[in-house]
Image: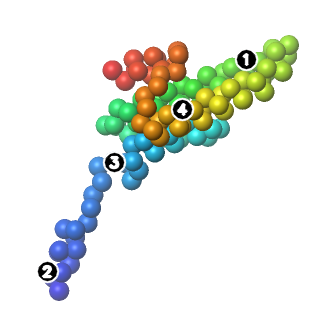
Amino acid sequence: MVEEKSIQKEKQVTYEKPYNLEPNVEAALAYLPFIGFFTSLAIFFVEKKDKFVRFHALQGLLLGGAHIFINMALAITFIFAFLITLVNLLAFAAWCYMMWNAYNKGEYELPVIGKIARDQLK
């Protein structure tokens, strides 16, 4: 009886990853539209070892931050407020493309944001 319990304890699998997810799924979750800012933040601070996941989390975080900043800037200037819808559509398309890219294990760098994210992880 005692031996059986010790064998069961030895069979327990321990995971080194903070989440029990594949790296490509973790990276794709960093780009979830509209809540991706928060998932990116969580993944970036929890994941310490996987550079692929950290890159996508930081790039998703910067993309979400840029989206919020541009929306606020356009909302303040009432002349360009009509562009908010266009910015939201472009941001949604970028999030969807980046989710697909990360899920397929790609490391596409967004024009300005990608270089910043890559430099921060060095």
Give the residue type at disc 3. Answer: Lys
Q: Is residue 33 visible?
A: yes
Please tell me which of labels 4 and 2 falls first in the chain. 2
Residue receiving disc 4:
98
Camera-side residue of 47 and 98: 98
Q: Earlier in the sequence, mark 1 or mark 2?
A: 2
Look at mark 1 in the image and give the residue it sits on: 73
Q: Residue furthest bottom?
A: 1
Q: Which mark is residue 17?
A: 3
75 sits to left or right of 19: right
Disc nearer the start of the sequence (3/2) = 2
Taking the spot 45% from the left edge, 16% from the top edge, the residue there is 115
Position of the C terminus by quadrant = top left
Q: Nearer the viewer, mark 4 or mark 3?
A: 4
Seen from the viewer's position, the closer of residues 97 and 19 is: 97
Q: Secondary structure at mark 3?
A: loop
